[in-house]
Amino acid sequence: MIVSQSSSKTNLNNSLDNLIQFEEKYNGIEGKTGSYQFRVLVYSANIIRVHITANEKFDEQSYAVIAKPEFEDFNLEDATNHLILKTSAINLKIDKHPVRFSFYDKHGNIINEDETFGTSWIGEQVTTYKKLQNGERFIGLGEKTGPLDRRGHGYQHWNTDSFAYDPESDPLYCSTPFYMGLHNKLAYGIFLDNSHKSHFNFGASNDRFSSFSADSGDMNYYFIYHDSVDEIIQSYTYLTGRMSVPPMWSIGYQQCRYSYYPDKEALTVAQTFRDKDIPADVIVFDIHYMEDYKIFTWDKVKFANPEKMIAQLRELGFHIVVMCDPGIKIEKGYEAYEDGKENDVFLKYPDGSYYSGAVWPGWCHFPDFTNPKTRVWWGDKLKGYVEMGVHGFWNDMNEIATWGQMMPELIEFDFEGSKGTTRKGRNLYGMQMAKSTFEGAKHHLNGKRPFNLTRAGFSGVQRYSAVWTGDNVANDEHMLVGVRLVNSMGLTGIAFAGYDVGGFVGNSSEHLFARWVQLGAFSPFFRGHSMINSRDSEPWAYGEEVEEISRNYIRLRYKLMPYIYSAFFEAAKTGTPIARSLAIDYSHDDMIYDERYHNQYMFGKNILVAPVESTKHLTKVYLPEGDWYEFFTDQHYHGKQEIIAECPIERLPLFVKASSIIPISPQASYNTTNLGDTLEFHIYAGKKAAIYTYYEDDGDSYEYEEGNYYKRTIQYDPKDSSIKISKVEGAFNSRFKNIKVCLHGFELAPISIDGKVIATETYDYQFVLPISNFDPIYTEPNTKLVVKDLKVLSIENSNDEVVIKW
């Protein structure tokens, strides 16, 4: 029951009232109530936008959404007490007295519906209340701590510099106000496109409703409905955009420290990777490469000749990534400061004076990245780095982080000329900085792909940057929290995400570092990083045992590079993440939400990773529906069961889904340009047919957008007892000369390739280097983890179709 307009309580909580009039538009409807107006726009059969305002005009500005409402295939029915807007997927019922929104599927099943309070205002704050459905779970929201299932919890979106954050801390650095609800075998998504501080309550401290609110601005949300979570993510990234294919070197191993200096130390670290035969692609420079922490400068003593150092690193096969902080030091004669004033690019107070905040260089001004001329100005400043040979940039401290953590809310942002304050701009600052860096670097690289990394962001940041989880802590709990953070970011469109391997704050133990490297090898972004005044944290810094384990798993990462790169191509094409929460493929399996198993995830389509603490030698693993193979031994398991897995410090529990197809480069060497000339397709016997898309390009340019790529599908059909490798699509010549098809778990009759019967060879196949034995409980000394009785078929890598039958 809505409180009467004459009630004194109305002044405390005003809700959307009765419909007075409405008008059908070509892509939706617009309506008015007594005090408010709303708009419903159809973006596709599966996406409907609900936009409600208490103002005279709708706020149309969005940095997140790039799609347009051009869909017209819907019907509108006008009944006495409600309107019904129908697409081929969704029926939206709009009650008239008062206006409330309820979403149904085509069979009349309720997907999501307003609670009695509907959309309400408490002062400027606007909230939409939704009925809690029976058994409803909630997933997503991006960089949020806590469990996979967010039911019973509440969260805020307000980008915050959270140094050494607690495993339950909220908010953190990056805001993506998008979540998915799951109940009764149904799934939907809701994206709140409002950059003010927002609040999400999933039945925390109440058993009546979930809700989402913003401290000011319009209620503007997108409702997405599909049969699967994966499809919902694809629609969400249709709205907010997808990453482009990153440079291949950026998904290799990156080594960072706060900080490597002088130049000789950076060169020594790079040479040690080569001397110890540990693959790596990137050396990262933190703030000490700058002169007095001033962006766009190099320390003249520690880095007397940066061009020469960068050239030497490139000769060793390394790319360089440099830190970019937004604070411009207030210092007479400092070029960026003087030029910034001349071009008037800094954030201002209402009286027109520049805002000053203290951070690493001292008192600073900050570029206003919501101003298009500022974005161009910033991008032009990157030219000097690019000319030196820098192809990677790291956007840090961009929440905005300042000492004291109390940036005034009256600061004015340009917002493309429409003006707004910190309240609207803070959550967008990091994303707009990332946009400026990405576009500027891309421009100066003249056809080469930049790598761009950011700490802060908002929905849509995936178009411009990878994201990492900030200043984590060296302990087992943080290691596992990082896994959930990355998986959750994948649920909200950020496919290229990762954490600081080994922990940034504090000192990792030997076994903790080893376990973290194993997990990092199965993270989209793979970087080792540690803080100043902590112990050295390179793979060889923890003794011979950890060095060998690290070498093995980093090398395994490089052997899997064809698989990983193909997963990045899929993410760029569809938005489906590389690290995939089990909630994507097994959404309605209760066991995956059990806190014993909610850290597990799929890496790409086919490899299940079971994260485990560094102190464990045995762990429980839950295998979802289907059949599974242990990665290192091919031991077969049936799914829908819990198993006990051995996890001595040299072995991370990994499993491969039956019917999987996994490409591997067994000759992978010291960086991503050295993957050898043989490509293996590892195919695992299963009951279901499978299709896998393998993808290559030059790994460095944008020529793939013009057709210079190599793509082929591999089809496995157990009923037809065949494997078909399609003809090549695209103009790129594969880097591999030979293909080997490696069959796991097959019971085979004589095998033919394109009709010709061939002999098959059976032998032990070694997935990784010898695993040193430091714990004889599980293995004999100096044994190897091998796959037994593997059948391998060699084929010349031609552009023609190949058919294998047995």
Image (spheres, rainbow, N blue to C red):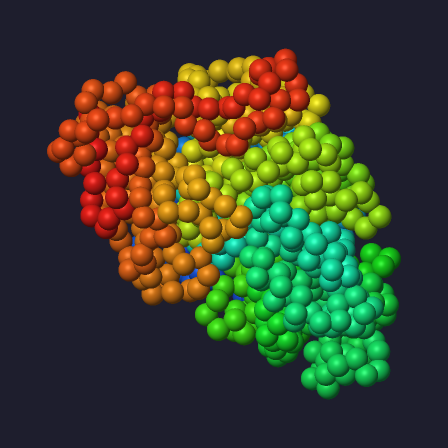
Q: Image quadrant of residue 376? A: bottom right
- Would residue 200 be visible to someone looking at this image? no
Q: Position of residue 626 (x, y in %)?
A: 39, 22
Q: How many numbered marks appear?
A: 0
- On screen, residue 790 above or below 493: above
- On screen, residue 532 above or below 790: below
For this rendering, which residue is in front, 501 or 406?
501
Q: Position of residue 490 (x, y in %)?
A: 54, 44
Left or right: 6 in relation to 650: right
Identify the image quadrant of the N terminus.
top right
- Would residue 562 be visible to someone looking at this image? yes
- On screen, residue 509 above or below 233: above
Q: Image quadrant of residue 89? A: top left
Q: Residue at x 75, y 71 (%)?
A: 304
The residue furthest bottom is 342
Q: Residue at x 26, y 44 (%)?
A: 796
Identify the image quadrant of the C terminus.
top left
Q: Position of residue 11 (x, y in %)?
A: 73, 52
The residue furthest left is 755
Left or right: 252 in relation to 480: left
Q: Position of residue 444 (x, y in %)?
A: 54, 74
Q: Residue at x 47, y 40 (%)?
A: 559
Q: Residue at x 57, y 65 (%)?
A: 391
Left or right: 478 in relation to 752: right
For this rendering, which residue is in front, 17 or 123?
123
